[in-house]
Image (tube, helix red, strand yellow):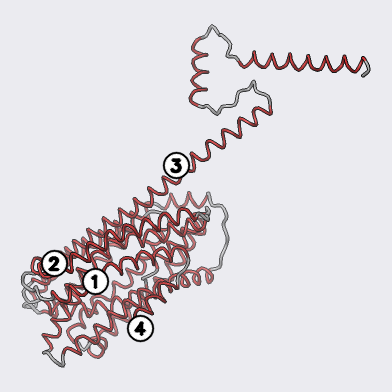
């Protein structure tokens, strides 16, 4: 090797060694006379261990930066998963508490009506038959709407498209306001034909008339509840439902007592008064949602300004989307409602061949009034999971988060089993004592309650699975399943 080249290499090595020595000395925190400055510097390094020192080389800084990001990102992810889980559980618990309170309040006015002199099982029969027709029209006009709107809205919110979510809400509100109005008018003007020819219970005409305005208010309230659920604000839905039930319980007792005094204890007019209270309560629930919406308008406007991934869609396209999602969901409820409507058409007619009209109506009142109320209590508690699963799984699917989908579905199924199994066993074994305790003046129906209680566990699991499937986008499977079960 030439001598000049050898000397150049040795000088380069010395220069690198001196640079390394300088960096090592610079990295040491210098002793300063100002102790406060030294203390603040040390505290900064302690509180933020990933702070990059200005004395590091560029390569070392990049390596340290990557290490800090790798450590911070899993922590943030864990916190986000924890907050999502807490939000889901909080929503479920809120809805569950609301449903328990609703059923307890419902039990209060049902007990009052059943034990009220002049009402009893006959009055329950009139109200139940009318309510099934009302429920059928309600199913067509609004059932499935909250889940459909919450699914579509949560998918938009998950990707940051708040403007698209709000547009879905506005168009759906206008659409179902028209559908609800048509349903109300159909029930109002067709009450006489339905009561006399279809139900063959002429006393039910006034109850149908009193229920007709409720269809409109429930339809538009359903859209507002779906929007709140889609924004992961399930508390608003729970509060509106609870408030509605409080008004329903109080107004039922007040209105029925007033009507009983005016009509000289007429069962027909007392039944009409009870359904009028239902209509007034639905208006109160809508009123709460309207005032709540006014309080969050600024928040919604701020979210719309921060919209990302906005995709414009025509009005027809959005209406088609909402209907394509809501109709399969509604089909499940329609099938269930059809089964009960078939009961209301056939049970009284069939029993009239062996019993008098009053006795047949009383037997149907046992099935539709007492037994249905008791067996639906665990279902109403479990409906919280079906309601909360739809937006939660839709949002997770939009983010392609399969782990969250599996966790929330398995947890919901486990809790559903813990709710359903004890209720099934308890009502089957203690059917007689339960009826005697709750309905001392009309305790008949032990065998009917025992048979009906066997379906509770299966219906609860079906309810939870349907919510998970609807959230995942498998909308037709629950409807097909229920259709096959009904055909059997």
Mark 2 and mark 3 in contact (Cβ < 8 Å)?
Answer: no
Image point 26% across, 88% down: which residue? 198
Please tell me which of labels 1 and 3 falls first in the chain.
3
Where residue 386 appears, as percent x and y from the top left, is 36, 62
Mark 3 and mark 4 in contact (Cβ < 8 Å)?
Answer: no
Residue 460, by quadrant, is: bottom left
Residue for badge 1? 454
Labels 1, 3: front one: 1
Residue for badge 3? 79
| Foreground residue among 194 and 10 | 10
Please rate how many residues cluster around mark 3, counting C-alpha atoms within 10 Å: few if below 14, some from 14 to 19, many from 20: few
Left or right: residue 66 versus residue 172 is right
Identify the secondary structure beneath mark 2. loop
Left or right: residue 32 versus residue 432 is right
Image point 41% across, 45% down: which residue? 83
Up-down relation of residue 160 to residue 109 (above or below): above
Where residue 272 appears, as percent x and y from the top left, is 18, 76
Distance from label 1 to label 3 (Cα)? 42 Å
Residue 383, by quadrant, is: bottom left
Please tell me which of labels 4 and 3 falls first in the chain.
3
Residue 435, by quadrant, is: bottom left
Distance from label 1 to label 4 (Cα)? 19 Å
Distance from label 1 to label 2 (Cα)? 13 Å
Please tell me which of labels 3 and 2 falls first in the chain.
3
Residue for badge 4? 487
| Tag shown at residue 430 | 2
Labels 1, 4: front one: 1
Please rate how many residues cluster around mark 4, counting C-alpha atoms within 10 Å: few if below 14, some from 14 to 19, many from 20: few
Mark 3 and mark 1 in contact (Cβ < 8 Å)?
Answer: no
Where residue 32 appears, as percent x and y from the top left, is 55, 8
């Amino acid at each position: 090797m030439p001598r000049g080249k050898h000397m150049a290499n040795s000088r380069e090595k010395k220069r690198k060694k001196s640079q390394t020595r300088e960096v090592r000395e610079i990295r040491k925190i210098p002793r300063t006379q100002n102790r406060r400055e030294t203390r603040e510097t040390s505290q900064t390094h302690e509180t933020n261990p990933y702070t990059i020192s200005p004395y590091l080389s560029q390569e070392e800084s990049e390596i340290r930066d990557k290490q800090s990001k790798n450590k911070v990102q899993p922590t943030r992810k864990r916190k986000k998963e924890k907050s999502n889980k807490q939000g889901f559980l909080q929503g479920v618990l809120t809805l569950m508490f609301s449903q328990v309170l609703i059923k307890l309040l419902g039990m209060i006015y049902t007990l009052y009506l059943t034990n009220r002199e002049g009402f009893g099982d006959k009055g329950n029969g009139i109200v139940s038959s009318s309510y099934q027709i009302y429920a059928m029209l309600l199913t067509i006009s609004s059932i499935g709407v909250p889940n459909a709107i919450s699914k579509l809205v949560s998918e938009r919110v998950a990707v940051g498209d708040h403007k698209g979510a709000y547009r879905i809400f506005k168009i759906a509100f206008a659409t179902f306001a028209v559908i609800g109005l048509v349903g109300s008018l159909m029930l109002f003007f067709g009450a006489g034909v339905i009561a006399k020819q279809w139900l063959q219970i002429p006393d039910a005409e006034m109850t149908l008339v009193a229920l007709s305005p409720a269809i409109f208010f429930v339809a538009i309230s359903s859209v507002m509840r779906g929007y709140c659920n889609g924004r992961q604000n399930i508390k608003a839905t729970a509060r509106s439902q609870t408030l509605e039930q409080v008004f329903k319980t109080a107004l039922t007792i007040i209105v029925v007592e007033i009507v009983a005094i005016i009509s000289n204890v007429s069962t027909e007019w007392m039944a009409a008064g009870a359904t009028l209270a239902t209509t007034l309560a639905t208006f109160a629930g809508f009123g709460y949602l309207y005032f709540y919406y006014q309080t969050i308008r600024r928040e919604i406007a701020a979210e719309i300004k921060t919209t990302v991934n906005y995709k414009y869609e025509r009005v027809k396209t959005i209406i088609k989307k909402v209907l394509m999602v809501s109709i399969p969901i509604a089909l499940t409820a329609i099938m269930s409602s059809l089964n009960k409507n078939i009961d209301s058409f056939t049970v009284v007619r069939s029993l009239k061949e062996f019993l008098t009209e009053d006795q047949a109506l009383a037997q149907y009142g046992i099935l539709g009034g007492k037994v249905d109320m008791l067996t639906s209590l665990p279902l109403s508690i479990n409906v919280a999971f079906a309601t909360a699963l739809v937006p939660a799984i839709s949002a997770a699917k939009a983010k392609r988060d399969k782990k969250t989908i599996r966790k929330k579905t398995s947890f919901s199924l486990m809790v559903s089993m813990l709710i359903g199994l004890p209720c099934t066993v308890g009502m089957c074994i203690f059917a007689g004592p339960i009826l005697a305790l709750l309905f001392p003046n009309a305790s008949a129906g032990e065998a009917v309650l025992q048979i009906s209680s066997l379906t509770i566990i299966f219906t609860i699991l079906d309810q939870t699975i349907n919510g998970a499937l609807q959230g995942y986008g498998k909308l037709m499977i629950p409807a097909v399943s229920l259709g096959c079960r009904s055909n059997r």
